[in-house]
Amino acid sequence: MKQVLIVGATSGISKALAYHFASKHVNLILAGRDMEEINRLATDLEIRYGIHANTIYFDALKEENISSFFERCLQLTGDLDGIIVSYGLMHDQKEMEQNRSSIREMINVNFTSVVYILEEAARFFEKKQKGFICAISSVAGDRGRRNNYIYGASKGAITVYLQGLRNRLAHSKVNVLTVKPGFVDTKMTYGLLKPSILVAPPRTIAASIYKSILKKKEILYTPWYWFYIMQVIRMVPEKLFKFIKW
Ligand SMILES: NC(=O)c1ccc[n+]([C@@H]2O[C@H](COP(=O)([O-])OP(=O)(O)OC[C@H]3O[C@@H](n4cnc5c(N)ncnc54)[C@H](OP(=O)(O)O)[C@@H]3O)[C@@H](O)[C@H]2O)c1
C-alpha cells in the first residue's frame, strides 16, 4: 500500500488513521474543510515519518466541490491504492425532530455526499481491478433507538449502500470495508458520554481499521466487543425494544 486518500481528515478517527498509516510509510492525501489544520497535520506527518502528504479542500455540502473532487485527488498523485471516508455529523435528535434543515444537512453530509464520492472511487478502482474502499458507518445504524434514530438511519443507509457496492465489486479485486465503531472519544461525542470502558480512543479504532484493510475484511465492529453487544441488541424482539428508553 503506497498511497491512500483520507476524506474528512480533521475528524478524530481520521487523524488517528493518518498517524497510523503514516507510521507504516503510506503516503497520504488528506482532504477536508479546515485547510489550516490539514496542512499542519500534513507537515507533522511528513516530519515525523518521512512520508509525502498532499492536502486538498473538501466540503461535503458543496456539490460543485464534490463533483470534481475524486478527479482532482487523482491529479495530485496519479494513482491511489484506497480511499477512507471518515467524516460526519451527529445533530441532536430532539433538535432534528423540530428542524428539517438540520435533518437535510446531516443526511447530505453522512449519506448523499459519501455516495457521490464513493461512486467515483468505485469506477476508478473497478477499472483498475485493485484497491480498497473503506467508509465509517456506526453501530447506531444497526438498530433505531429513540434518542438517536435519525443519525442511526443515516448510518444504516451507508451500511446498506456499502453492502450493495461490495456486491457490485465482488468480481473485481476491490475490497469494500464497512466500519462500525461503538463509542469513540472524539469531538462528535464530547460532553455526551461519561468516561467508561465502552468509550474507545480513536487510535484503537485506527489500528483495527488498518489491520482489517490488510486482511481484506468486509465488516468491522470496533472495538471487537461491539460485535457481541450488537448481536444481543439485534435479538431483542421489537415488541419489547420499542418500550426501552434510550
Ligand atoms: N465518535 C463516535 O463515537 C463515532 C461512533 C461511530 C461512528 N462514528 C463515525 O466516524 C466518523 C468520524 O467521526 P469522528 O467522531 O472521528 O468525527 P469528529 O471528530 O466529530 O469530526 C467530524 C468531522 O466531520 C467533518 N465534517 C462535518 N461536516 C463536514 C462537511 N460539510 N464537509 C466536510 N467535512 C465535514 C468535520 O470537519 P471540520 O473539522 O471542518 O468541522 C470533522 O472532520 C463519522 O462518520 C462518524 O459518524 C463516530
Image: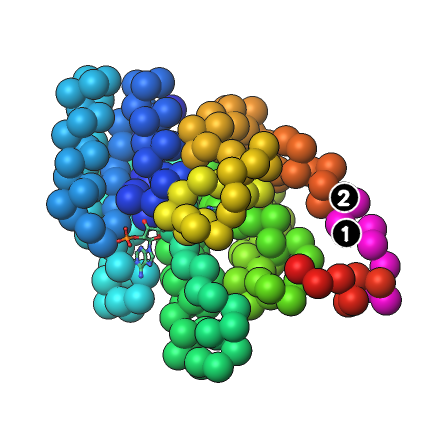
Task: Answer with left or right where residue 246 lies relative to residue 233.
Answer: left
Which stretch appears magenta?
231-239
Q: Is 237 within the magenta?
A: yes
- The answer to whether mark 1 is within 8 Å of ligand 1 is no
Q: Tell me what residue is drawn at x 57 percent, y 63 percent.
A: 148
Whether label 2 touches label 1, CB < 8 Å: yes
The residue at which mark 2 appears reads as 231
Specify the quadrant that holds the N terminus.
Answer: top left
Magenta stretch: helix, strand or loop mostly:
helix
> Which residue is nearer to you in this view: 108 or 140?
140
Q: Tell me what residue is drawn at x 37 percent, y 25 percent.
A: 20
Estimate the x, y position of residue 117 in percent, counting from the top left. Answer: 38, 55
Can you tell which mark lies on residue 234?
1
Find numbered disc 1 in the image and state the secondary structure of the residue it sits on.
Answer: helix
Hey, what amino acid is under mark 1? Arg
Work out whether residue 131 can be spotted. no
Counting other residues with Cα less than 10 Å from the Cα at mark 2, is it few (<14), some (14-19), or many (20 or more)? Answer: few
Q: Tell me what residue is drawn at x 77 percent, y 51 percent.
A: 234
